[in-house]
Image (cartoon, grey):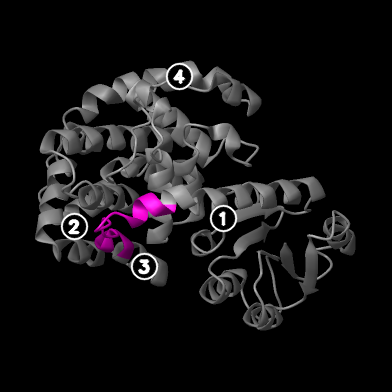
């Protein structure tokens, strides 16, 4: 495995480099101090893992990771967070280009665990059986273009206002109508009628409207009956709302989006429904793996892909705390009436919150039925 460290010795001490080098001949470790040197290295030879310090002398970490993604899309990209930032959700601009976020000071065992778990995830998404099954599908669902355009507009200009967002949504009348329908359900409106898209942005907020756009696009895919799509949409909206409640405000948006997309694999032909107890003897790819693979093709952020892939086996996540994967696991299980991994919740220290989460699910279930 070829590993490239980018940063000075304050962030990446020599003993850390030596630690990986001493693990065996299969680890080839290089360290450079600036972003342009890292780009030059990536252009010369394949890199399995790049680990980037929070501050570089020439480029931002997000810019460098974006360049690495273009040059070597197969490379695992790890961003280091300063101590003050490690307790918060990483900045939006870096979430889309980094696969993993690790806190400084970096502990060797944490780094090794992250690398091995990301290798596992990459193997999951590159599973030959899964790739073959997806490859046989004549037409994959299209990426949610309006949602991605909305994300791009917000990332490019932080001053994007309600009118700009409403204009984007209004460009697709079918999606706009569906968004307004959902906005005026009891689940979102709070009893107040929402008559236009600008009012929806103002009343609901950008993150909620963005999720409604995503739900409207994704569940317009005509691979299921109307009744099946509506049932999936209701479950997805319930899961999304629950996951947002289970996480701190800074992480709620990631959790909500991941939960909303958690069952997207069910829209693909040739996959098994993992909610079906008889599916354990079915050799077809499971819908969680298939969904994660599809989201990887769409280029969604890795925290979302990992949460979808590991939603039914959260212990496979290398994140030691209760974050997006854990929230999606609990939210989707409650929404679908599936079992919850209480041993995992005990391990990450949140088992005592489960009764409250169950009460929240019961309260929201009645509301989402009207969505």
Residue, x 85% and y 60% (percent of image)?
Answer: 21
Of label 1 and label 4, which has the lower sequence position? 1
Which is more toward the observer, 272 or 281? 281
Residue, x 38% and y 24% (percent of image)?
Answer: 334
C-alpha distance separating marks 4 and 2: 35 Å
Of label 3 and label 4, which has the lower sequence position? 3
* Label disc, if present, on residue 152 of the rendered structure: 3
Which is more toward the observer, 315 or 284? 284
Disc 2 is placed on an element classified as helix
Magenta range is: 131-148
Q: Are marks 2 and 1 in contact (CB under 8 Å)?
A: no
Of label 1 and label 3, which has the lower sequence position? 1
Q: Which residue is mark 2?
A: 198
C-alpha distance separating marks 2 and 1: 29 Å
Would residue 262 be found to the left or right of residue 110 on screen?
A: left
* Label disc, if present, on residue 356 of the rendered structure: 4
C-alpha distance separating marks 3 and 2: 19 Å
Which is more toward the observer, 158 or 241? 241
Of label 2 and label 1, which has the lower sequence position? 1
Which is more toward the observer, 72 or 92? 72
């Amino acid at each position: 495995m070829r590993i490239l460290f980018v940063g000075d010795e304050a962030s990446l001490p020599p003993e850390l480099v030596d630690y990986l080098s001493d693990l065996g001949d299969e680890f080839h470790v290089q360290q450079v101090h600036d972003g342009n040197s890292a780009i030059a290295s990536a252009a010369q030879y394949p890199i399995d893992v790049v680990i980037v310090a929070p501050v570089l002398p020439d480029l931002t970490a997000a810019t460098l990771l974006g360049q690495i993604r273009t040059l070597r899309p197969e490379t695992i990209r790890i961003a280091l967070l300063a101590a003050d930032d490690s307790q918060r959700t990483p900045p939006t601009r870096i979430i889309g280009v980094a696969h993993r976020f690790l806190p400084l000071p970096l502990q060797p065992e944490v780094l090794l665990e992250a690398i091995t778990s990301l290798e596992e995830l990459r193997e999951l998404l590159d599973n030959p059986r899964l790739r073959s099954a997806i490859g046989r599908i004549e037409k994959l669902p299209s990426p949610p273009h309006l949602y991605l355009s909305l994300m791009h507009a917000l990332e490019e200009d932080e001053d994007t206002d309600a009118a700009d967002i409403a204009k984007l949504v209004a460009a697709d009348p079918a999606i706009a109508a569906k968004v307004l329908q959902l906005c005026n359900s009891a689940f979102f409106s709070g009893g107040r009628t929402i008559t236009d898209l600008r009012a929806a942005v103002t009343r609901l907020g950008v993150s909620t409207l963005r999720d409604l756009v995503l739900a409207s696009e994704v569940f317009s895919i005509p691979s299921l009956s109307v009744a099946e799509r509506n049932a999936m949409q209701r479950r997805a909206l319930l899961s999304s709302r629950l996951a947002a409640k289970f996480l701190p405000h800074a992480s709620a948006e990631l959790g909500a989006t991941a939960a909303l997309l958690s069952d997207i694999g069910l829209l693909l032909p040739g996959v098994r429904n993992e909610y079906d107890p008889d599916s354990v003897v079915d050799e077809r790819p499971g819908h969680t793996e298939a969904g994660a693979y599809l989201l990887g093709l769409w280029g969604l952020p890795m925290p979302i892909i990992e949460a979808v892939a590991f939603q039914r086996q959260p212990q496979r996540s290398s994140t030691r705390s209760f974050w997006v994967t854990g929230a999606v696991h609990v939210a989707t299980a409650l929404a679908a009436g599936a079992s919850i991994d209480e041993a995992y919740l005990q391990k990450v220290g949140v088992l005592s919150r489960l009764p409250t989460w169950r009460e929240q699910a019961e309260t929201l279930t009645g509301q989402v039925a009207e969505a």
